[in-house]
Amino acid sequence: MKHQSPNIDRTKCVISIKGLRKSFDDFHVLRGVDMQLFQGENLVVLGRSGTGKSVLIKIIAGLLKPDSGSVNVLGKEMNHISPRELDALRLKIGFSFQNSALYDSMTVGENLEFPLVRHVENLSQQEVDERVRTVLEAVGLSQTINQMPSQLSGGQRKRIGIARTLILNPDIMLYDEPTAGLDPITSMDINNLINEVQVKFNTSSIIITHDLTCAKATGDRIVMLLDGQFQYQGTFDEVFSSLDERVKSFYDYNFID
Amino acid sequence: MISNNKKEEASSTRKHVLSRKLDTIFIDLYNIYSFLLRFFKEVFVPPYEFKEIIRQCYEIGYRSLPLISLTGFIMGIVFTNQSRPSLSELGATALLPALISVAIVRALAPLVTALITAGRVGSNIGAEISSMKVTEQIDAMEVSAINPFNYLVVTRVIATTLMIPTLMCYTIFVALMGGFVNIHANELTSFTSYFQQVFDATSFLDIFSSLIKSILFGFTIGMVGCYKGYNASKGTEGVGKAANASVVTSMFLVFIEELLALQIINALRAG
Ligand SMILES: Nc1ncnc2c1ncn2[C@@H]1O[C@H](COP(=O)(O)OP(=O)(O)OP(=O)(O)O)[C@@H](O)[C@H]1O
Ligand SMILES: [Mg+2]
């Protein structure tokens, strides 16, 4: 069980969502999601495959438009944000993709430099190298700097993906299934990394997962996404003390033997 | 991305006005139109990705050289060899250099260069961009506030538009050399007298119109590859489809453009 991070400030809301709805064709994925992310906290969103977890954070990052409802990120209303404001906002958001989304044609080092040299002006090559080295050390993969993404394992790719978002010092981190498809030990490494990032880089994070170990290890607060809405929030134990059949089966099948 | 999705939503909730198929054609046309419009808007807007443009020029231009050299040279030999019998019936084999230079400069070089690069480069662009789309690399650029259209599409279209005319000039040279090898072996024409006849037979308008055509072909090949890649459907089969569609569509358009250009050039010659 995770110790609550001391940096959490529950009076400051970095993301606030009200009545968010999103559907594709006639398929209603999100049906009135309400949520708040507080300064410095790790919020875990649990839900089964296809419940719209990825859709939710893509809306937060401005990759998808909501059908209705309000999404406020760092004081900016996503519904009427200008392209320029959106770009400025995105620099404060780190997005770790479900499949890492590393740029195949570039080495690890070039992947990390790519956003940096385009957004921070007047950096000397030395400073760029320095920043790259710092984030690579933070994720514990300094030796991979000259490798191509295709030469990395799934867990390494995830870490590089996280490093690439850290290089711009984001205020908010969005992790899409950081541990999916990884072995338990590598998963634990990633969980620790997420907690380290929270403290070291002072981020507020949304962690999307269906891995209960990850939820338990990283979440200051947990919510269940059920039927397109957020239900049952609280600490890990609070959520899973619920008698709702859907929540219970989620827990039970996770530890089936 | 946002505007794209708006369009997708609009098209999905919209009732089908005509038949479903006809509707998708019109939506496609509209999408192509807005893709083109976006290109002309963004090509002038900084940041300019010079490094990526150079890299693409190298990929598209330099790396096509072996294939172009081989094809161009063989084309020159074969075309010369096949033209000889009909000319010798008329006792006019002396006109061979003039004939092949006209054929190569006016028609063969632009068309062959375009078709070969449509196959090699078009499929490459289609596959590369669609796989970036499918694996969310384009989204990753978007969320780090980098304009993927500018970085991926503008650079590649500029590179094809510059490189295909350049390759076309090279094809002319190589094909004429192929022709020379064949003529020298048969008619014992000297190098200088061969090229003297070649230059006498080609006009400025010939070269100029071929260059313009090649620029158009290059733009088409780059644009089609990028459009098909950028609009690939999700899933890995989208990549194969995008690569395939890039080649088929750009070849088709190259022929259409060739026909149209022919009409215009003929009008110019007559006028
Ligand atoms: N761009 C899109 N177009 C159409 N449908 C989509 C799109 N994106 C997502 N969906 C649909 O929305 C639903 C939710 O997708 P989402 O990717 O958010 O699921 P998820 O909760 O992240 O699942 P997983 O745990 O498998 O990643 C899916 O049924 C999917 O088919
Ligand atoms: Mg997902």
Image (cartoon, coloured by chain):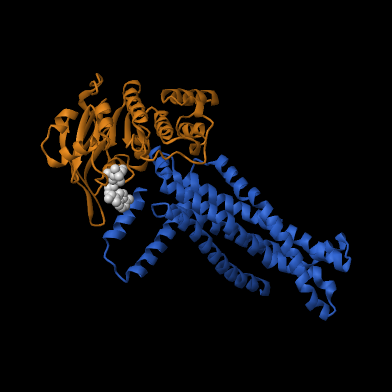
Left or right: B214 in relation to A233: right
Q: Nearer the viewer, residue B16 or A154?
A: A154
Q: Nearer the viewer, residue B233 or A87?
A: B233
User: Residue A89's image quarter?
Assistant: top left
Q: Is residue A122 visible?
A: no
**Number of marks present in the image shown:** 0
Chain B pictured colour: blue
Q: Residue at x 48, y 26 (%)?
A: A132
Left or right: A54 in relation to A249: right
Q: Residue at x 57, y 44 (%)?
A: B53
- Where is residue A137? Give x, y as percent: 45, 23
User: Residue A217's image quarter?
Assistant: top left
> In the displayed structure, would residue B2 be above or below residue B113?
above
Left or right: B143 in relation to B201: left
Residue placed furthest toward the bottom: B90
- Where is residue B174? Give x, y as percent: 74, 58
Q: Nearer the viewer, residue A72 or A149?
A: A149
> In the displayed structure, would residue B230 be above or below residue B18?
above
- Where is residue B29? Give x, y as percent: 42, 63
> In the displayed structure, would residue B192 be above or below residue B125?
below
Chain A pictured colour: orange
Q: Nearer the viewer, residue A170 or A104?
A: A104
